[in-house]
Amino acid sequence: IGTLAIPSGIAAIFRRRAAQLSPIERRLLEILAVNARPAPSGLLEALTESTDGTLERALNVLVQRQMVSRLPGREFRYRLVHDRIRETVYGDLNQVDRASIHQRIGTALELLYRHHLDEYSHELAHHFRLGTASEKAFEYSIMAGDHANKTFAYDMAAPLYAYALELLDRGIGNTALRSSITERLGETYYRQA
């Protein structure tokens, strides 16, 4: 079965509801759609550059309108309430806007998790890969591949190393690392078998 399209009526209803939102509320929907996973409030604050309570008010509106859910924890995390909403919002963004938001998310994650980059390297590689920073995508793909190997997630490591090699083929990254990355990829395939 192929990908099912969102019924046009549901998407139209959501778009009408979203059109009534403030600019920051719409921006938050876009950020959450591109992030595709629960986002901590610190990340949303960094991306919206909002410190005067505007962010909290906007998130409360989205929660009250049942577009976003608030997940409990040490720090609140937020996510869109349904994948169909995410697909609609993401689908409505043009490629340039998607890449820009991915880039901004990657940059904000780098700052927020600067002392734990290894743990977040897969997420960083993903956002920089879909953003505009190929050099960072290269670095974080290798780091994420190494992290995946350490945690025995060989099925995750292999594509990350392969992507780093693909970037080298396009002239991006440190070519002196080619043999090392190729060796890591080979070892990963060996361990997978």
Image (tube, rainbow, N blue to C red):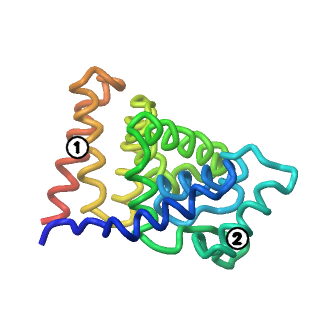
145 or 187: nearer the eye? 145
Number of marks in the rendered image? 2
Label 1 near label 2: C-beta < 8 Å? no
**What secondary structure is found at the residue carrying circle 1?**
helix
Residue behind mark 2: 76
Q: Give the answer, above or below, for where 93 lies relative to 132.
A: below
Q: Position of residue 148 (x, y in %)?
A: 37, 59
**Picture coordinates of residue 34 (x, y %)?**
47, 52
Residue at the bottom extreme, as displayed: 72
From the viewer's perspective, tell me whether residue 69 is left or right of residue 125. right
Q: Residue at x 70, y 61 (%)?
A: 41
Residue 60 numbered mark, or none: none
Amino acid carrying label 2: it is: Phe
Closer to us: mark 2 or mark 1?
2
Crowd around label 2: few <14 · some 14–19 · many ≥20 (10 Å): few
21 lies above or below 71: above
* Disc 2 element: loop
Does residue 184 appear to the left or right of 105 in the view shown? left
**Image position of 96 (left or right of 79):** left
**Residue 155: x percent and y percent?**
24, 62
Q: Quadrant of the N terminus?
A: bottom left
Question: Which residue is under mark 1?
Answer: 162
Instruction: Name the amino acid type tagged 1.
Output: Ala
- Residue at the far top in the pictured view: 171
Residue 191 versus residue 10 in the image, above or below: above
State the residue at coordinates (27%, 39%).
181
Image coordinates of residue 159 in percent, x first then y, are: 25, 50
